[in-house]
Image: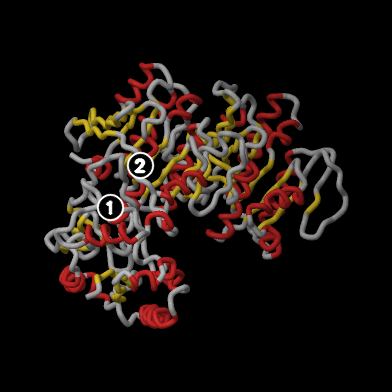
Amino acid sequence: MADYILTGIPGVDKILGNQGIPKGHSILISGGPGSGKTTFSMQFLYTGITTHNEAGLYITLDEDPEDIKKNMSGLGWDLEKLEKEKKLLFINVSPVRMDTSEKAGLLQLGMKEFKLVKLLEAIKTGINEINAKRIVIDPITIFTLQYPDEIERIYAMRDLLSDFRKNGCTNLLISELKGTGIEREHQFEEYLVQGVILLRTIMKDGKLSRMFQVEKMRRLAVDNQPHPYEITNNGIEVYPDLVVFK
Amino acid sequence: MSLARIQEAKDKGIILLVGTPGAGKSTFCQQVVLRNVSMDRPVILVSTEQSPYEVIELLRKRGLGEKGELNLVDAFTQTVGLECVQNAGVVCANCSDLNSLSIAITRMRERTGQKDTLLVLDSLTSPYLFNGTEIIKFMRLFLSKFVSEGNSVIATIDEGCGKQEDIGAMMSVSDGIMRIEKSKSSIAIEVIKHQGLEPESIKSPLEPKHDEFKLERDLNREFMALWFDSLRKGGKSLREETGDYVNLFWPNLAHWSGMLWDPKGFPKMTYNLNRYDSSQLREANSINPWKMRFKLELLFTAQKLGLYMPKSFSKVKDMKMVSKPILKNVDFEHSGIIEYRDDISKTDEHYFRIYESSDCCGLENIGCAIASHLPPPCLPVSLWGWNWMEGNGMRWRLNVWDWGTLTVNLSLYRGK
């Protein structure tokens, strides 16, 4: 029997054929600014820890983990507690920000020369430290930006993904979505990963609509249609039975 | 066919109610809401043209009890750019966005968690004006789906608010169509298409409203004499057209719903909903003479301890027994319950017949209100004045019925 892990995010598992994400797969979460990518990923880790007892690793390449924690505090999740219990680990591997101060329980790998090796190292550390089963990389865009050459970029990404396959963790890779309209260009990462989830915000006539779409999910018969979602006080809520109205 | 039948028709479909602005669509919807709430059917009311406070106030005026469960989707406040506050009974939506509307309804439906929910959408006009023909998709892809899950929908639309072909398309995706038309002298509701009803039209003349009862003006000897006479067997009713027998729905002993079947005169009189519990009576009791207060307090306490309320009383045969003394004690034809319909009553659903002009505590909005517009006798007696009553040769007799939390009935008898 193939193993799947439930996301625990309201409505999402129903779209994923009531099974969830295939274990060990790397899924791209793509969305525009303010579409709830971080919330989605955090929710994925949080429910993993609280309901499935699967430790979660949050690798941030851009935002300060403290900021993320602050932003998520409104959702009523006690992340500090999970960190203390060694269920959740934040690793900041931001290549841009230099912050040498060591914070308690926070591993600092900030550096200017940031390459694949460093990222893999961080993942390894996370897995060793807390036996992580779910990993979030926020955002993968920063990683790919390190490789200006396209061929090199694709190879780096492939190497990263093949490493993921070995470690057995289920990963969410966050990426910025280019183009918010219905028509958009596909990003190369979308072809490499095993699943793509789009969180899209569409402005039409001054109205903002949010739609959730599973564009691709290997090994699963999923509902590919867009469905409306909301960012509520409890996190993301997707409505799998509703269609999107323009 | 009566208006009640239209309002109660349980069709699994979308009923579209068409009418010009001011024809009475919202009034109709409110009646439908009250009627169904009284039958303990889950109702979701989507309000796009009025704020929830206005809606609740209107419904309260029409008889929604303080605790009447109402699930409201407020699609007004956000739409006009104000901040909407969500709580247990209110979910916010913006009717310029059909997604937000469908999400809000879905959420409310999840909250109530019951099947056979009635969705009252008053109205589709604003969503249509904001979204154009997308509303037809909304009806087909959302409302129809909602209906297919075992629910019903009543939606209103202003006739002439948009292109004729759009309204036509909305009609064609609906399972039933009704039209309300108002002229100078009458109001008519026409069933154009309906799965459960034959096409028909109910017409009713518009009449000036009855004057409200004014204590200082109307409570004089002559009037009281007329009123009591009207209650007596063979007495002349204060209102010419009263005299129909109507059924009172009484879901259980703990509370009742004063909701009547088959009111003929729409929209002259709408029958109101009452839910009684002892807390209201206890409040009223606070200004009674001390002896009476003491007696009542004893009773309330006893009820709280469950002394008067055997559980089996909800059975049909017990209910019949309970109603016997009421029937026996009624010495005015026009007063109170005249029959217990054990042939159609069920364990959790009891039907009584009362005379339409009856005067009975708890039925003030049903009987005496339409008959004479008198305050019900269960109003704090001190307001009326004991001396006044005694001086008129009337005597109040306190009748205590131990009906669960409902409980106390003050009936009026003519002194010998």
Give coordinates of residue B259: x percent, y percent. Answer: 29, 54
Q: Is residue B115 left or right of residue A231?
A: left
Which quarter shows the N terminus of chain B? top left
Which of the marked residues, 1 or 2, is nearer the chain's N terminus? 2
Q: Amino acid at mark 2?
A: Lys
Q: Amino acid at mark 1?
A: Ala
Q: Is residue B270 above or below residue B344?
A: above
On residue B215, the disc is none
- How many labels sit on residues? 2
Residue B55 vs residue B356, the one in the foreground: B356
Q: Is residue A169 left or right of residue B226?
A: right
Q: Is residue B183 above or below residue B266?
A: above
Element type at marker 1?
Answer: helix
Which residue matches tag 2?
B209
Chain identifier of the residue bearing label 2 in the image: B
Work out whether residue B317 can be spotted: yes
**Residue pictured at 54% horizontal, 43% vertical:** A25
Give coordinates of residue B261: x percent, y percent. Answer: 23, 50
Chain identifier of the residue bearing label 1 in the image: B
**Residue pictured at 36% horizontal, 59% vertical:** B220
Task: In the displayed orientation, state which residue is furthest to the left.
Answer: B343
On residue B371, the disc is 1
Label 1: how many Cα within 10 Å (few below 14, some 14–19, many 20+):
many
**Quadrant hosting residue B39:** bottom left
Element type at marker 2?
Answer: loop
Cα–Cα span, label 1 and label 2: 13 Å
Give coordinates of residue B206: x percent, y percent. Answer: 31, 34
